Every structure is written in structure tokens, then in C-alpha cells.
Amino acid sequence: MPQVRIIAKNFMDMVSSLPAMKLDKLYENAFICEAILRSLPPLAKKYVLQLLYIDVPVTASSFQEWVLADGASKHRVAIDRLIQLRVFTETVDRKKEATYRLNPMFQMNLRKHIVHGGVLPRQPMAANITVRLPSLEELDNYAGQQWECFLLHLINSAEVEVTTKSISPSMMKVFQRGLLSQRDQEGSRLTESGFQFLLMDTNAQLWYIIREYISNSEDRGVDSADLISFLLELSFHVTGEAYNMNTLDEIQRITVKDLADLGLIKLQQGRKDSWFIPTKLATNLSISLSDASSRKQGYVVVETNFRLYAYSTSKLHCEILRLFARVEYQLPNLIVGSITKENLYKAFSNGITADQIIAFLQQNAHPRVAEKVPSVPENVTDQIRLWESDLNRVEMTPAHFFDDFPSRDVFEAACDFAREYSSLLWEDSKKMRLVVKTEVYAHMKEFLSHQK
């Protein structure tokens, strides 16, 4: 069963996958060098700072002397990370002795940035030019609403279009890469990966979309290194401040509009100028999933009788619960439903697993039950897993049945032939009958034609 996986936990995983030439181009920007330094494991940061003013290669044995006996694994992780990002270049001599040195471009720009600082990519606009800017609370609410609208397009785009603007073509292209499928004379439908995506937490969903947005940038005529560079630059902006759109080039303007669909950016228009306002989602882009802001307050309570109560006013929460539960009625701030065998079977057929459903219920548990162990009753989690295993008890294999063999020798030869192809599913030696997989049916017929 296909699974949605977050390949890149942060931008550094995407950066490390870039070709060497594009990586070196990124390091021409001092702010990118600082962002790389921020992202490194503690031991890797120490190595970079120790080599910052050393202009000759340092041997691997010298590095080993800096490491305690119990730090060997962390040392290896740090070195591997630095090499992947081309922060370190590794050379092996004839005696197979490895040496490391800092990437010259990275070293030069990081030195300048640490000693002299640097001019930010762009300065905030003056308060007397902009109209009233949203407060941080209003900006957080805006980001949450935009993200919900974005996800509701996945579940029911026709209904969402009535109340929200349509998602930009570049964002819809991201959808098409695995989350939605388009069939002839039919509307867009969620794929198995799409159903699984909806059960992820917000940070994981955001990284999935950003990764896909970057990975298909070349198809839109956008250099992936330039896009990563701009997205990392956003992490140096101040949440809630206004930045003039005139400071952006054409590609960056398109990117900002796309990010506004996600809630990473808020756009505003004045009499003469227009500007964009980064939300926390944008300024935290260089932070890994594990370092992201603390989990939002949960809202789901599951009882031992399989009743489910969700204390939420969100339409999105209601639609997500419908993926695996029966929603019975919805009050202004309460969704009441139950987890049933029929609804779970429907979820399993859509590619959602029992573990994903259980993880969703645990991650979104209401504060009153979140501290309990377990936060979801054991009889409920056990039953969800049992219902999933019921579906996996019988495995369907396309097959063909053979009988009426002219002799026992031909029957046994046919069995041996099927075994050679690992395609013999069943045999009855007394009545000379056998069942083989469909993929060898044509070969079996040809084989039998030569035996008669």
C-alpha cells in the first residue's frame, strides 16, 4: 500500500540534493550560509566554526582527536551532513588518509557575515506608507484560515470555490503530483496518498507541499536553487512586517502569490504600493519538523464505546473525521460521531491505515485526555487494528485452473513447470488438477501443447 512520506524534514535535505554547481551558487549568498549553519547538528556547527579561519585541509585523524569515545556516531553523522551539503570537501590521498576543508565560497561569505554582519535582503516599509497592518494574532488566524481553505480544496474543491478564490495553477499542479487524480469526464479525486496526507499534522503537510512545489519548479521554468534561496531568505524577514513587492523580481512575485494561497504570506494593496507580510509559517521555513512550534491544542475525545466528540468549529476538522468515522450531528462548537466498522472499511479501501488513524486521534487528543496513558482507549485502538487485519486475511491472486490431463506424467511435468516459475498455487494429485498464476497461463498452454 503506497504511503505518503516526508522525504525532506527541512530545506537542508532539499539543499543537499542539489547538484554541486547549484550548491556553490547558493553559497554566494551570505544569508544562505547562515541558514545552513543554523540547520546543522551541534557537533557539525562546532566543526564549521573551528575550521572557519583554517585555510589548509585538516586530516580525519585530527578530527577524531576532538571526539570523545562515546561520540563516534554523532561525529560520523556530522561529517556526513557537512559533506552532503558541500560545506566540507573531502579528499583522500594515496595512503587512503581523508582530509577535510571548508568550501571556499561558504567559508569566505560566512566569515564576512559573522564579522561585519550584512544588509538584510530587503527592509520593512515605513509605517506611514502602509495602511493598518494585521496584529500577530490576526496574522495567525489568517494563516490558519488559508491553510484550511487549501486543504478543503483537496476534499471538495467545487464547494470551496463558492466561498474562496481558486487555487493558483502552480499550486494545483502540486496537487496533481500524487494527491489528486484527474480522470476523463470526471472531476479531481483524492488518491490514496491524498487521503493519507489529510491525516498528517500541519507541519508535515506544509513540508510535503513545499517539497513538491520546489521539485516541480523546473517544469515552470524556475531554477530550483533560486527558489530555495528565496524561500530561505524569507526566514530572515520579520513576522508581521510589510515588505514592498517592488523589491521582488517576476519569479519571486509569482512565488509570493502562490505562498499566499498556503497562508505563508498575506498580500495587501495601498494607494500606490503593494506589499507582502510574512506569517510564522514563512519565517520558520528554515526550521526542521522536530524544531517547529509546539503542537496545536487537540480537540478530539474518544470513549470506550467508540463514540467520538470533537470540540471544534472548523469545517475542515469535520471533513477529516468523515474520512474514517460517522459524523452524526454538528453543533456550533461540537462534532459528535462514532467510529464504525463500515466507515473504517471505507477508509482502509482509500489507502488509510489503522496506524495512521490511531496516530491522528492521539496527536489531536483534547487536553483533558491528552495527558492520560493511553489518550485513546486501548479497546478502540485494538479493534481498529483488528478490523484492518480482517481485510488482509484473504489475498486475491488472478489464476487459471487446469484439469483433464491426458496422463499423470503430463500432469507432473506441468506442476514442475509451474514451480520453476514460482506460479503453482494449488494442486490435487489424485484428480490431476492444478491452479497457476495468470502471468504464466500463456506459457503453460504452450508447454502443454508440446506434451500431448
Image: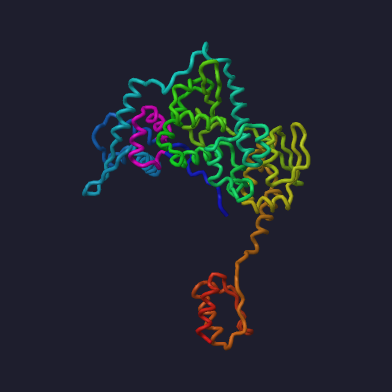
* Residue 121 image position (x, y, % from top left): 41, 23
Q: Is residue 363 above or below residue 437?
A: above
Confirm whether residue 346 shows in the render: yes
Q: Is residue 80 magenta?
A: no
> For the view shown, which residue lies furthest in the front direction?
185
Chosen colour scheme:
rainbow
Pinpoint residue 394: horizontal percent, then vertical percent: 65, 64
Could you tell me residue 18's position as x and y percent? 39, 41
Apparent side of residue 24 relative to residue 327 in the rendered image (left or right): left
Question: In front here: 427 or 295?
Answer: 427
Q: What type of secondary structure mainly makes up the magenta span?
A: helix
Q: Residue at x 30, y 40 (%)?
A: 89
Judge whether residue 69 can be spotted in this image: no
With respect to residue 185, does 423 lie above or below? below
**Vertical relation: 430 (above or below) 341:** below
> Where are the magenta residues, as a range?
15-42
Residue 136 horizontal/vertical position (percent): 58, 21
Quadrant location of residue 364?
A: top right
Tell me the quarter of the image containing the N terminus: bottom right
- Residue that extends furthest to the top in the rendered view of this protein: 128
- 120 lies left or right of 380: left
Left or right of 93 in this view: 132: right
- Between 451 and 7, the residue placed more toward the observer is 451
Q: Is residue 23 magenta?
A: yes
Q: Pick whichever, 432 or 159, lies toward us.
A: 159
Seen from this angle, which residue lies furthest bottom? 407
